[in-house]
Image (cartoon, grey):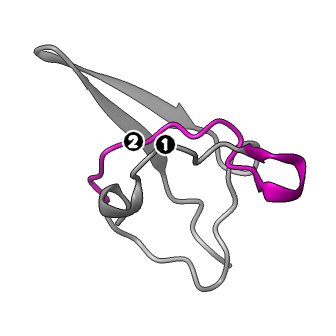
Amino acid sequence: MLDSGELFLSIPNGGDTIRKYYEYEKDFYPGATSDSGILTAEIVYVGYGISAPELDYDDYAGITSKEKLF
């Protein structure tokens, strides 16, 4: 059986930090291959992340997110 673990998002806000906690089983459920760790990254907003050229719609249009991911 897996330990429930803890998941939260820390957002710097001036000199303070906003911390959003997520509830085990309601908001997240770690899989058998889940790992522990800390990730620090820049957030890039891309709407729903939809790219549908056949509909002439792309949430990624004009966003250079490649260098901001991982």
Q: Quadrant of the C terminus?
A: bottom left
Percent coordinates x, y for residue 28 in the rendering = 67, 52
- Given residues 14 and 64, the one toward you in this image is 64
Mark 2 burial class by Cα count in 10 Å: few <14, some 14-19, many 20+: few
Percent coordinates x, y for residue 58 in the rendering = 70, 46
Percent coordinates x, y for residue 23 in the rendering = 63, 40
Residue 35 within the segment the image draws in magenta: no
Vertical comparison of 35 with 41: above or below: below
Mark 1 burial class by Cα count in 10 Å: few <14, some 14-19, many 20+: few
What residue does disc 1 label?
62
**Left or right: where does residue 31 sit relative to residue 6?**
right
Q: Quadrant of the N terminus?
A: bottom right
- Given residues 45 and 38, the one toward you in this image is 45
- Given residues 59 and 1, the one toward you in this image is 59
Residue 37: image tag: none
Residue 48 within the segment the image draws in magenta: yes
- Residue at the image point whose x is 62% and y is 74% from the top: 2
- Residue at the image point whose x is 88% and y is 57% from the top: 54
Does the image show residue 44? yes
Vertical comparison of 20 with 5: above or below: above
**Left or right: where does residue 63 sit relative to residue 17?**
right
Secondary structure beneath dot 2 equals loop
Residues shaded magenta: 38-57
Q: Earlier in the sequence, mark 1 or mark 2?
A: 2
**Left or right: where does residue 33 sit relative to residue 27?**
left
The secondary structure making up most of the magenta span is loop
- Looking at numbered disc 1 in the image, what kind of residue is underneath it? Gly
Percent coordinates x, y for residue 68 in the rendering = 32, 55
- Looking at numbered disc 2 in the image, what kind of residue is underneath it? Ile
What residue does disc 2 label?
43
